[in-house]
């Protein structure tokens, strides 16, 4: 019978240092062709986040939107697009633009008794962010007031 040995190894994972003197830009773009949040969106997000010069990368599956902050000396919109399409050829980048600030996600409706600062002094109607006829998946099963 073969002898089984346990070998301990040490793995050190290092993220490239961000240059404190770099000029960072923010890009927002649509990604078409994603079919799921974990397999597609998270994979693309991780791939972009690992790029040298990328400070942050977020892919919002529901909005089909990527938001990336990057060092202009090391990353370009073209290299971002190439990274996305290298994950799978079904992904298409559209509407690439440089922005001052990332667009905010549409607000979800708060509960009538919400106590958060953002809801203080608001009526129940003002807390409802989606339209009554909203067809998004998050609203499909809810009944609107």
Image (cartoon, helix red, strand yellow):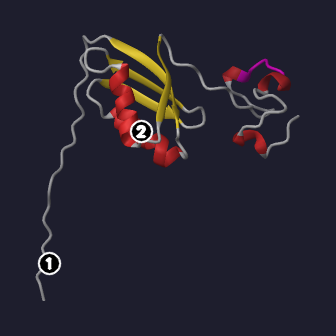
The range drawn in magenta is 119-123
Q: Position of residue 39 (x, y in %)?
A: 47, 48
Q: Main secondary structure of the magenta part?
A: loop
Image quarter in which the C terminus is found: top right
Work out whether 9 lies above or below 88: below
Q: Disc 2 marks which residue?
A: 44
Q: Secondary structure at mark 2?
A: helix
Left or right of residue 8, residue 21 in this image: right
Work out whether 75 lies above or below 6: above
Residue 20 sits in which quadrant? top left
Q: Disc 1 marks which residue?
A: 4
Left or right of residue 73, residue 64 in this image: right
Q: Position of residue 56 (x, y in %)?
A: 38, 27
Image quarter in which the N terminus is found: bottom left
| Residue drawn where x is 75% and y is 39% of the image | 139
What is the CA distance from the residue labelled 2 to the residue labelled 1?
Answer: 39 Å
| Residue drawn where x is 53% and y is 44% of the image | 37
Q: Position of residue 115 (x, y in %)?
A: 72, 28
| Residue drawn where x is 39% and y is 21% of the image | 69
Nearest the viewer among 30 and 52 is 30
Work out whether 114 lies above or below 99: below
Q: Is residue 70 magenta?
A: no
Nearest the viewer among 98 and 113 is 98
Q: Is residue 120 magenta?
A: yes
Work out whether 125 lies above or below 86: above
Residue 120 sits in which quadrant? top right
Q: Secondary structure at mark 1?
A: loop
């Amino acid at each position: 019978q073969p002898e089984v040995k346990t070998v301990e190894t040490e793995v050190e994972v290092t993220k490239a240092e961000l240059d404190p003197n770099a000029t960072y830009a923010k890009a927002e773009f649509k990604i078409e062709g994603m079919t799921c949040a974990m397999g597609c969106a998270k994979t693309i997000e991780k791939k972009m986040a690992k790029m040298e010069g990328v400070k942050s990368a977020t892919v919002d599956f529901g909005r089909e939107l990527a938001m990336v902050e990057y060092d202009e000396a090391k990353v370009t919109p073209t290299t971002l697009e190439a990274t996305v399409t290298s994950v799978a050829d079904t992904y298409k980048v559209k509407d690439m633009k440089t922005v001052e600030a990332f667009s905010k996600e549409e607000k979800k409706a708060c509960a009538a008794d919400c106590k958060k600062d953002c809801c203080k002094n608001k009526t129940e109607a003002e807390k409802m962010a989606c339209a009554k006829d909203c067809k998004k998946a998050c609203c499909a099963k809810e009944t609107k007031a």
